[in-house]
Structures are given as C-alpha cells and as structure tokens.
Amino acid sequence: MQQSHFLIGAATSGSGKTTLTLGLLRALTRKGRHIQAFKCGPDYIDTWHHWMVTGKPSINLDRFMMSDKHIRSLYRYYTASIEVAITEGVMGLFDGYDGMKGSSAEIAELLHIPVVLVVNAKSTAYSVAPLLYGFKHFRPQLNIIGVIFNFVSSPSHYEFLRKACEDAGVESLGYLPKQSEIAIPSRHLGLSMEKNLGFEQFFDRIADLAEQSVDLKRLLEKTAVEKLSCQEANSYSAGNKRIAVAYDEAFNFMYAENIETLKREGEVFYFSPLRDTELPTADFVYLPGGYPELYVKELSSNRQMREALFQYIEQGGRLLAECGGMMYLCRSLADKEGNVYPMVGILPQDATMEKMKLKLGYRQLFCDSYRLRGHEFHYSSVKNADKQLISCAEAWNARGERTHVPLYRYKNLLAGYTHLYWSDPASNQWFKDFLIGKW
C-alpha cells in the first residue's frame, strides 16, 4: 500500500504556505481522503486552522523542543492509518533558529518527506528559473518534487512560469490565482470557538481554486511512498488524576500532544474562565495562553472564577500557567488604551498591552536540576512587580545567549511567558515530577 506524504515549503515567508496548505487540506478532505496535518515549528495558530479544516488535531514537529526520536515516533503514529499527510513548513524552506537548524528542510530530511515548493509569483515571471534551480540543487539530498505558484495574475503569466520550470528542471504542479477574496481572515478570529466567522467560506473558496488550477492527481502521484510501518501507541495505564484545562475564546494556545500526555495521567476535562463560576475539583490545573486581552472585561467581571483560582493556589493546588494564563494570574491587566481591569491577583505584578512590542523565540529555562524547553511569543509586558517576585530559572535562547524570560514559582504554581512542551520522554522529567509533587 502507498500513502502520499509531502511538506509545503516556501522560498520566503509570505509566499502563501498557510493558504495553500488549507486549500489542499479542504480540497482533499472534500474528495473523501483520510488526511493528517502537521506543522513545522512551535506555531499553535496554524495548527488550529488545520483542525478547523480536517476536524482532527494537527501535530507540531519541532527540532528545538523535541528529540529526533520523538519526532519520528509522532510522525509514524499519526500517519499509520491515513492516506495523505500534509506538513506545513515554517518561514523559508531553509530558515531555522540558527542557520538551517530547526528549519522545514531539516524536518523533511529527517522524515524523508518530499517537498512541494510554493513561490510568490506576484512580481516575477521567467526569473523564477534560477531561483528554482538553486533550491533544487542547493541541498541534493532534499527531495524537491515540484512547485506551486501563488499570486499568479493570469494564464499567460503562468505560461512564463511553467516554461521557467521546464528549464530549471523542476516540475510545475499548478498555481493559485491572485485574488483578494482568498486572504486569510484575522488570526484573532481564527482562535474563536465559533465557526461562523468567514473561515468555512474561505476554506471552500481556496479549495475551489486549488481544484481548478493545481494538478491534485499528479501531486499525489509524485508524493506517493510505501506505507510507513505502523507505530503503535505506547501502552500505558491511565492515571487517576483529575486534570482541569482552561479552554475558551480567551485561553486556547496549546500543543495537541501536550494534552495527549495529560490524558495519560488521568481524566482531562475543560472549564471556561470566561463563563464558569466554579473551578472544577482537580489535582492539576492548566492555564494555557491565548488572547485574554480581547476578553479582559469579561474575565474581570467573572469575580467568582478569579476568587476560585486564587484560593485554589493559596491552598496548595498545583497549577501551570503559560503566557496569557500567567497574565490572568497577575493583579491586573491593562488594555492597549490603558484601561486597567482586576485579574486573579496571585502574582504581585501587573500585565499590560500598552506600548506593545513583540517578543518571540525559543527558550531554554534552567531551574534546579531541570531544563524546560518551549517558545515565547507575546506583545504584552509585566510591570510593578513586588521585589519578592523573582524568577526561579535562568533563561537562554536557541543560540545559547542569556535572555530575560522569568519563570515564577509560588507554592505549587509554576507560571511564565514560555509556552512549554512536555510530551517528549527524552526531556519531560521536570513535568512528571511537577505533576506528582516531587518538584
């Protein structure tokens, strides 16, 4: 038996990887294909979009946060019973956190996945020939099997591009036309729990265009490989912990495999800091990141939940809070206009969206004898911290440079800006120990 596996890579960021990936996912799903989506890197928004199209979790593949063994295991497990596996790349094909390290190309080589290049043809024609030739021959062990062009203005424009492909020795698999109505809706809206925000229409529109101008049959033929040997899930006996996960419009940035790890520890159930007035009885609470700043009034108005979380932590409840979850635990959260709203108040500092400045990158946090790995991405900042509130960890970026990313420890609370990954058996001892109270 054969399966089709391919990675959507790009010459540069902004070429249309996400648009093309979503269009192909929807087009092939409509044809009844059994599909699994993956995402290179730490992004949790693109994986959400994949889930909206396929109805099943999309899995992150990340060479900074995960060991190669873990990546291979995940890929084999999630592709065991599917027909088509589509992996969306990150940035340009060879762009990593340090040169090529952590790039889409590395993932493709590690997993032996054929690469389909997407090229922004908006302001070029035959000049793509040397570009394609360079990508094809720069790293011969990388299997670039074809190209799909984006932002093509007309069929005659595509003919110039197709001729360039012939001369560069890279097969053209079609194109997406330049159309304003296929712009991805707001990334904020994409993380809403509602489905009536224009996404379904967008997915169908881009799928229609893909079916019209991309050779789907040829794409699947060129990316067909022998069915991978089945990777059985590790056998385990589910634990007996009660695990509560915050999940609503304000809190939903989480890695699918992290939740699977929680399920192995016991019963996972969800609650909404926006709407629920009581915190469920739990041995462990997870407050993931999200967009609390978009719902700051509602979160502040739900005084019962704020007080419930405060008491839970004060009484020794075990809780992990990341980014937006950490902001929610501060004394207050100020919006972009400077309006201040009371939050849970367990962390003696204030979070603010004023003077927004992006902070992002991979992080290694060293605390006691543990090393925690994850990714930082936020525009907010914290201020007015009490002198007693200090970081319990030393932080480093992916290039081994010191950086200021605090990790707070108070009683059985662990909180910080870093979105942590704890599903790799090679590096998750900190999480196992934290969960059972050994750390």
Image (spheres, grey):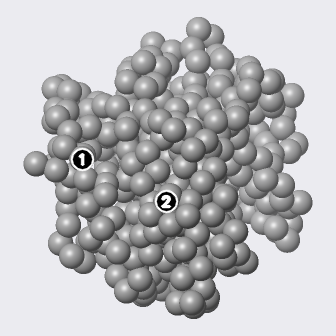
Residue 333 vs 283, above or below: the answer is below
- The foreground one among 301 and 222 is 222
Mark 2 residue crowding within 10 angstroms, few (<14) / some (14–19) / many (20+)? many
Q: Can residue 48 be seen in this view?
A: no
Callout 2, which amino acid?
Answer: Val
Q: In which quarter of the image is residue 58?
A: bottom left
Name the residue tied to disc 1.
225
Residue 191 vs 313, above or below: the answer is below
Q: Which residue is drawn at 81% across and 24% down?
A: 402
Callout 1, which amino acid?
Answer: Val
Name the residue tied to disc 2.
170
- The foreground one among 174 and 268 is 174
Disc sitting over residue 416 in the figure: none
Q: Which of marks 1 and 2 is in front?
A: 2
Coordinates of residue 197 in the picture (x, y in percent):
48, 84
Q: Can residue 333 be seen in this view?
A: yes
Label 1: state its secondary structure: strand
Farthest left residue in view: 1
Q: Which of marks 1 and 2 is nearer the N terminus?
A: 2
Judged left or right of residue 82, residue 319 is: right
Coordinates of residue 184 in the picture (x, y in percent):
56, 77
Q: Which residue is drawn at 81% across and 31% down?
A: 404
Coordinates of residue 147 in the picture (x, y in percent):
49, 64
Q: Distance between the residues labelled 1 and 2?
A: 19 Å
Coordinates of residue 30 in the picture (x, y in percent):
24, 77
